Amino acid sequence: KLNELIVAVIQHIAVNDLAFCLIWVLPVTVNMIAMVGWDHWLLKPTALSSKLRYYLIKYLYSVGMYLGGALVATKLAILKYPLRAKIWKRKRAHLVCVVVWLGSIWAPISFLVMEKGH
């Protein structure tokens, strides 16, 4: 049986993966299936949608990396403190994941600032 802290972090990783699939994999797959010629795409991206997708992918990529680190840290904490881990609640894991989601906003912002600076 998995610890409820690990399950909570895995749930956040699953949400991140689903969002990544909706933003990156699904549009590319639809365009590849519907492509008539090499220069014709069904979902032709506009400049705004391309930029938005670019920054959302950067955001989701950084969230995924940090959630993976949170999963490893959670497993380590459970192994190191097995008696304390029994009283830790799922709410604590969700709080850590929310901090990861909010803290990862720096990635697309830093890319935006560097792009505007040049």
Image (cartoon, rainbow, N blue to C red):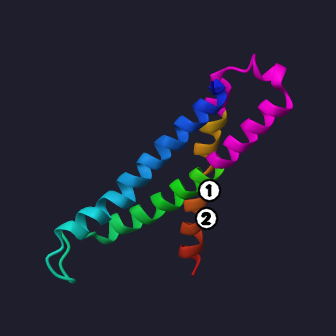
Front residue of this view, candidates 2 and 85: 2
Front residue of this view, candidates 101 and 88: 88
User: Would you say 117 lies left or right of 31 here?
Assistant: right
Q: Position of residue 74 (x, y in %)?
A: 73, 36
Outermost residue on the front side: it is 1
* Residue designated by label 2: 110
Within 10 Å of the Cα at label 2, are there few (<14), some (14-19), or many (20+) other Cα atoms? few
User: Would you say 117 lies left or right of 89 here?
Assistant: left
Within 10 Å of the Cα at label 1, are there few (<14), some (14-19), or many (20+) other Cα atoms? few
Q: Amino acid at mark 2?
A: Ser
Q: Is residue 118 above or below residue 106?
A: below
Q: Quadrant of residue 106?
A: bottom right
Q: Position of residue 117 (x, y in %)?
A: 59, 76
Outermost residue on the top side: it is 87
Q: Which quadrant is home to the N terminus?
A: top right
Q: Position of residue 61 (x, y in %)?
A: 54, 58
Helix, strand or loop at mark 1:
helix
Q: Residue at x 61, y 51 (%)?
A: 104
Which stretch appears magenta?
67-95
Q: Residue at x 77, y 23 (%)?
A: 85
Main SS of residues in magenta: helix
Examine the rendering and report whether any part of residue 75 can be seen. Answer: yes
User: Would you say 28 lies left or right of 103 here?
Assistant: left
* Residue designated by label 1: 106
Labelled pair 2, 1 in contact (Cβ < 8 Å): yes
Front residue of this view, candidates 74 and 1: 1
